[in-house]
């Protein structure tokens, strides 16, 4: 029976909890913490496993808020929308502005990492590789070339197979080196010779890059069986799975290469650790696996940046003529992709992976804090009940999530915070200009697809 005005067509709710989890694992990727391993180890004085676990605590709390806001806005799946609709459109714009920093820097640091990994295969100059990768990502996205869900699933299974092979190789290496006791050590979590809570906190502010993309599950709200239960549960479980797997991965890397001062290249330190455990074959296998994973995530991140800017442009909160343009043939946000491609190419030549990751997390954590506040407003401030149960269920989790995210955000290095504050100040000034010094409200109607 065809859909009518009385019975409009709807998406079928066919996705289960396990479907959501597998989708989230594909988006985040099982190799997520490995690209930043060397940077975090250097900053945190070797305590990468500890930073991953602290980051997991913060992300689980925030995942609860994302899941609950997805229940309130099942068609949205966007911090830009959650904050704009629940708190104030102008705050929603500033949240979107912070996310734009996140989205534009994600492909930039991926370009830096891909270029370093490609130099392990063919030692061409870094600038040549960086410009080539930025141009490749932009070209493929302009052409509308996207990997299929089946391809992503195959790649994810392949990554898991490589990780299993690495764990077996790493275990054998550690047993040969120190006997069975070499497999177990508290040193990756706490080394009294180098532990500093300040350094670990700063390392955590970078290590949370591992979890970026966990909120993607909320974009599937209309396709899920029992979304009020499964979106929240899947988002939290995804953060836990990512954290536990990531902790095991970096634990193995730290046990293989405990001296963080001696990495040949900080950006590709995990590849070097794999090579120490398994020789040239494992070195190149891990290098290729992470290169493929990073290429895929970089393309997706650039496309996400283009879509976010398009959504904001379509709302005319940023110039609609430029940012709200779609290529009539490819149906892609052409101007935004060219802009982000240029930012990617230039940025990869001007900043380090560490600086880019810190700036990315500066923007991301503003969005995380804003979503936690939006959850407080919706489920505590605007409810009639403010008793003990409401306080425990509706206030404490998002408040604790906000405070932990605030602490990690503030633990970023000073240069990153200065650059981030400059970016946000530009957003505030632009918003003031658009709203006649905040006397009017912006109108937010768009949902950034795929955010």
Image (cartoon, rainbow, N blue to C red):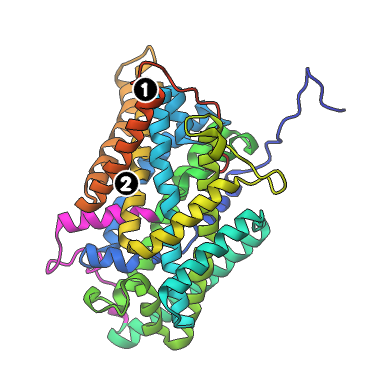
Residue drawn where x is 27% and y is 66% of the image? 41
Residue beneath the point at 55% across and 51% down: 337
Query: Crowdedness of circle 1 by 10 Å Cα count: few (<14), some, many (20+)?
Result: some
Eye-nearest disc, 2 or 1 = 2
Quadrant of res 346:
bottom left
In the picture as drawn, the residue positioned furthest to the right comes out as 1
Identified at 51% across, 72% down, the residue is: 289
Q: Which mark is residue 177?
A: none
Q: Which residues are magenta?
A: 180-209
Residue drawn at (23%, 76%), measured in percent from left and top?
259
Tag of residue 362: 2
Q: Is residue 135 above or below residue 402?
A: below
Element type at mark 2: helix
Task: Compare residues 108 and 380 and report the one nearer the observer.
Answer: 108
Q: Nearer the viewer, residue 21 or 179?
A: 21
Q: Is residue 165 visible?
A: no
Q: How many marks?
A: 2
Which image quarter: residue 278? bottom left
Q: Position of residue 436 (x, y in %)?
A: 37, 20
Q: Is residue 190 magenta?
A: yes
Q: Where in the figure is residue 285, as x and y percent of width and height? A: 50, 79
Left or right: 74, with 37 as reference point: right
Q: Position of residue 150 (x, y in %)?
A: 67, 59
Q: Which residue is mark 1?
A: 377
Would you say 383 lies left or right of 226 here?
left
Q: Is residue 32 above or below residue 8?
A: below
Looking at the figure, which quarter contains the N terminus?
A: top right
Q: Earlier in the sequence, mark 2 or mark 1?
A: 2
């Amino acid at each position: 029976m065809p859909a009518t005005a009385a019975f409009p067509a709807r998406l079928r709710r066919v996705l289960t909890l396990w479907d959501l989890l597998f989708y989230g694992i594909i988006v985040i990727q099982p190799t997520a913490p490995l690209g930043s391993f060397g940077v975090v180890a250097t900053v945190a004085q070797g305590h990468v496993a500890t930073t991953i676990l602290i980051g997991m605590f913060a992300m689980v709390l925030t995942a609860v808020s994302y899941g609950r806001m997805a229940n309130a806005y099942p068609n949205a799946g966007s911090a830009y929308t959650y904050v704009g609709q629940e708190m104030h459109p102008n705050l929603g714009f500033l949240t979107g502005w912070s996310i734009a920093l996140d989205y534009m820097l994600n492909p930039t640091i991926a370009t830096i990492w891909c270029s370093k990994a490609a130099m392990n295969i063919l030692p061409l100059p870094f600038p040549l590789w960086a410009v080539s990768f930025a141009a490749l990502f932009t070209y493929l996205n302009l052409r509308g070339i996207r990997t299929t869900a089946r391809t992503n699933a195959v790649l994810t299974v392949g990554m898991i197979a490589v990780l299993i092979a690495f764990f077996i190789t790493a275990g054998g290496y550690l047993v040969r080196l120190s006997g069975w006791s070499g497999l177990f050590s508290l040193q990756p979590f706490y080394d009294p010779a180098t532990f500093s809570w300040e350094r670990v906190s700063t390392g955590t502010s970078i290590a949370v890059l591992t979890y970026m993309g966990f909120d993607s599950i909320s974009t599937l709200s209309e396709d899920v069986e029992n979304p009020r239960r499964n979106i929240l549960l899947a988002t939290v479980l995804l953060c836990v799975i990512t954290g536990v797997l990531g902790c095991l991965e970096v634990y193995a890397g730290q046990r293989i290469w405990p001296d963080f001062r001696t990495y040949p290249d900080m950006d590709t330190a995990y590849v070097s650790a794999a090579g120490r455990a398994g020789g040239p074959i494992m070195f190149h296998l891990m290098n290729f696996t992470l290169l493929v994973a990073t290429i895929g995530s970089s393309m997706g991140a650039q496309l996400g940046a283009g879509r976010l800017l398009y959504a904001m442009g379509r709302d005319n909160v940023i110039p609609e003529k430029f940012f709200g343009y779609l290529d009539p043939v490819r149906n892609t946000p052409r101007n935004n992709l060219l802009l982000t491609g240029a930012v990617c190419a230039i940025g990869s030549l001007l900043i380090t992976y560490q600086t880019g990751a810190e700036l990315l997390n500066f923007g991301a954590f503003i969005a995380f804090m804003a979503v936690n506040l939006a959850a407080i407003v919706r489920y505590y401030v605007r409810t009639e009940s403010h008793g003990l149960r409401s306080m425990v269920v509706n206030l404490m989790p998002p408040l604790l999530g906000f405070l932990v995210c605030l602490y990690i955000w503030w633990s970023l290095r000073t240069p990153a915070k200065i650059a981030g504050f400059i970016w946000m100040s530009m957003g505030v000034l632009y918003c003031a200009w658009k709203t006649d010094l905040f006397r009017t409200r912006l109108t937010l109607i768009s949902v950034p697809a795929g955010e």
